Image (cartoon, rainbow, N blue to C red):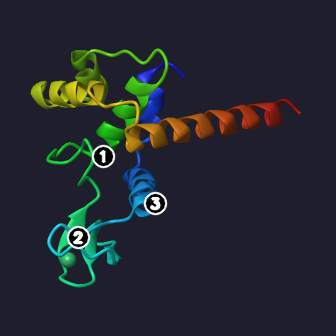
């Protein structure tokens, strides 16, 4: 896969993005910023974790490159996966067009932040893993079609 559109298709549904993010967050544990407690409820209506001790809410974006951004998860996750994959090169201007987003500056900031992510970034690694899984499934499906 070397086309951004294909990546965007994979992450075009918000619930898939939420599911992937939740897996990452829960693997590493959520710590309440306010009281340090580790036990949380998942509030599906708010799409946030709520501390069982003090009710402080933690967003899925907290502690990731997406923190403080109002752009949709779909933008971030497809762009992280695409730009981190082998041969994934796209200018902020082209990305803005592909996403049909009306403003250039937020997309430029997104691209700059993603380019600064270290190899060890957990979200980046997880998304690459996820993409390689999708590729394998696609190949298996194509093999079955030829039967
Ligand atoms: Zn708390």
**Element on which disc 2 rests:** loop
Residue 126 drawn at (x, y percent)? 47, 43
Tag of residue 27: 3
State left or right for residue 90 relative to residue 131: left
Residue at the image point whose x is 10% and y is 26% from the top: 105
Whether residue 1 is visible here, answered yes or no, is yes
Residue at the image point whose x is 29% and y is 58% from the top: 60
Which quadrant of the figure contains the C terminus?
top right
What residue did someone put label 1 on? 73
**Element on which disc 3 rests:** helix
> Toward which corner of the image does residue 101 lie, by quadrant?
top left
What residue did someone put label 2 on? 32
Is disc 1 surrounded by few (<14), some (14 to 19) or many (20+) residues within 10 Å? many
State left or right for residue 145 relative to residue 13: right
Whether residue 10 is visible here, answered yes or no, is no
Residue at the image point whose x is 40% and y is 44% from the top: 122
> Toward which corner of the image does residue 62 lie, by quadrant?
bottom left
| Disc number lying in front (3 or 1) | 3
Q: Residue furthest front?
A: 36
Residue 61 drawn at (x, y percent)? 26, 52
Which quadrant of the figure contains the N terminus?
top right
Report, in whole angstroms, how far the alpha carbon at label 1 lies from the one at label 2. 22 Å
């Amino acid at each position: 896969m070397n086309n951004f559109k294909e990546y965007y298709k994979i992450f075009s549904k918000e619930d898939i993005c939420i599911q992937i993010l939740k897996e990452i967050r829960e693997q590493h544990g959520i710590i309440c910023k306010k009281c340090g407690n580790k036990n949380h409820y998942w509030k599906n209506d708010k799409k946030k974790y709520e501390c069982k001790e003090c009710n402080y809410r933690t967003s899925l974006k907290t502690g990731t490159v997406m923190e403080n951004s109002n752009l949709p998860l779909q933008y971030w996750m497809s762009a992280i996966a695409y730009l981190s994959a082998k041969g994934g090169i796209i200018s902020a201007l082209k990305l803005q067009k592909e996403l049909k987003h009306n403003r250039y500056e937020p997309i430029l900031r997104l691209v700059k932040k993603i380019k600064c992510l270290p190899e060890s970034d957990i979200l980046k690694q997880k998304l690459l893993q996820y993409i390689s899984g999708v590729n394998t499934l696609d190949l298996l499906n194509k093999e079955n079609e030829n039967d």
